[in-house]
Amino acid sequence: MPTDVASAGRPARRTSPKRAATAAFFGSVIEYYDLVAYGTAAALVFGDLFFKGVTSHVALVLSFATFAAGYVARPLGGLLFGYIGDKIGRRTSVLLTIALMGGATVLMGLLPTYSSVGALAPILLVLLRICQGLAVGGELGGAVLISVEHAPAHRRGFFGSFSTAGAQAGTLLATAVFSLVTLMPSDDFSSWGWRLPFLGSAVIVLVGILIRYGLEETPDFEESKASGRVRAPLREAFTKHPGKIVAITLVMAGMMSIWYVITVYSLSYATGSAGIGKTSMLWIIAAANLAIVVMNPVWGALSDRVGRSKLITVGLLLEGALLFLYFTAVDSGSVGFVLVAMLLVAGVGHAMVNGIFPAFIAESLPTEVRYTAGSFGMQMAGLIAGFAPLVAVSLEKSPLGVFTIAIACFAFCLLGGAAASTVLRDRRRTGAPTEDPQSVLAG
């Protein structure tokens, strides 16, 4: 049986790749369940409960402003937990992120409203939202690394893909839970029912902590620490690898922007301008999330055979091109056509990038700055992409209508594809060492 070259000279792996991938998957489920639960509650009830003395419209705006505060905090979370992950260990960092996220979310379920404590209520809400943002900022980078760095070199694409599939699974779970509690009588939901999804997350958070607590530190980090390469992750990330941070941001921003366009902006456009039923669109978006959960490992496994950079570039270009088909389907008003187009955008284009980028990012950066640089790049992409629905609304009235949005997104994907094929490179082919010392020194 061939020896895994990448493991030569490293401590024996005690945590199996399957367990590490499971821990990454469920951790991401929890983080994004909590994130989506907040966004849903912000849209449905937070405006009325936490902001008084203003019009209902202003209350909704303020509610979404608290949602945006989490996005601003995410890059800071990437730096904070990236530093911990590169300096102290991946295991420590991912335990802290899940505990912080879970604690903030459960406390949201216990928050007093404006009618009870006045202005203190929205202040506490914003503080907890910032804690959520910090936790999410460090979570994805950590989940990516515990799944990829525990995997054998020739299967890092496959095992790494589960860390990002968990985000879509968490979105599905939160949507399902809120769909159930909104069936309650309106007064009951507004008074106490909205708290149930937040309080219920305590159960899955405890399960996630237990799963992650049993993890060993990753072999990559142990080797880096033993070699003395772990020094000043923040300084080294920004002085030696700024180009790669920018490239990671461009790759991820293209993918994330399209995702927010089809799941946030197009929900409003399809139900308003195109006349498609809201329930139908929600089911279509749920199907898109499920498609990504299923297809992530498929594309991750394929990248183990053919390499990451080419597939990342192809995935970005496909996702950008398929967005034109999606908007054509939405304008047609055909629910079946919209479903097929959405599944193609999500399962082919989006999942191709989403499933591959965990291994792709890990193999593009040296171990000692991998968490810091990777997390910051990903979270800056999330911050940029968070404005995609707002930009889409402003472009909708242009002469080409929604196809102007598709053109802008495709241009963004071109930038990301160029970054993937020129700035970021695979550090290995199947069976080769994960890190080439000369390329590490070269940055």
Image: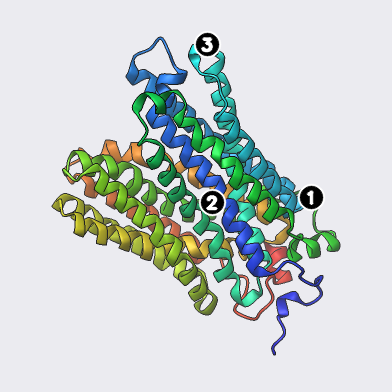
Q: Nearer the viewer, mark 1 or mark 3?
A: 3
**Please, what is the three-letter code of the amino acid marked with disc 1?**
Ile
x and y, in percent, of residue 247 in the image: 52, 55
Which of the pair 61/43 is nearer the observer? 43
x and y, in percent, of residue 375 in the image: 60, 49
On the rendered structure, is 267 left or right of 368? Answer: left
Mark 2 and mark 1: Cα distance apart in space: 24 Å
Which residue does the image show at 60% across and 78% down from the upper left?
Answer: 429
Mark 3 and mark 2: Cα distance apart in space: 33 Å
Which of the pair 305/146 is nearer the observer? 146
**Please, what is the three-letter code of the amino acid marked with disc 3?**
Gly
Which of the pair 204/11 is nearer the observer? 204
Q: Is residue 213 visible?
A: yes
On the rendered structure, is 130 left or right of 439? Answer: left
10 Å crowding of disc 3: few (<14), some (14-19), many (20+): some
What residue is pinned by disc 3?
118
x and y, in percent, of residue 214 in the image: 74, 57
Q: Which quadrant holds the C terminus?
A: bottom right
What residue is pinned by disc 2?
29
Mark 1 and mark 3: Cα distance apart in space: 41 Å
Q: In the rendered structure, which disc, 3 or 2, sits on the residue that comes first in sequence?
A: 2
10 Å crowding of disc 1: few (<14), some (14-19), many (20+): some
What residue is pinned by disc 1?
88
**Please, what is the three-letter code of the amino acid marked with disc 2?**
Val
- Tell me the SS state at disc 1: loop
> Is 256 located above or below residue 80 in the figure?
below
> Is 210 located above or below residue 129 in the figure?
below
Q: Which quadrant holds the N terminus?
A: bottom right
Q: Nearer the viewer, mark 2 or mark 1?
A: 2
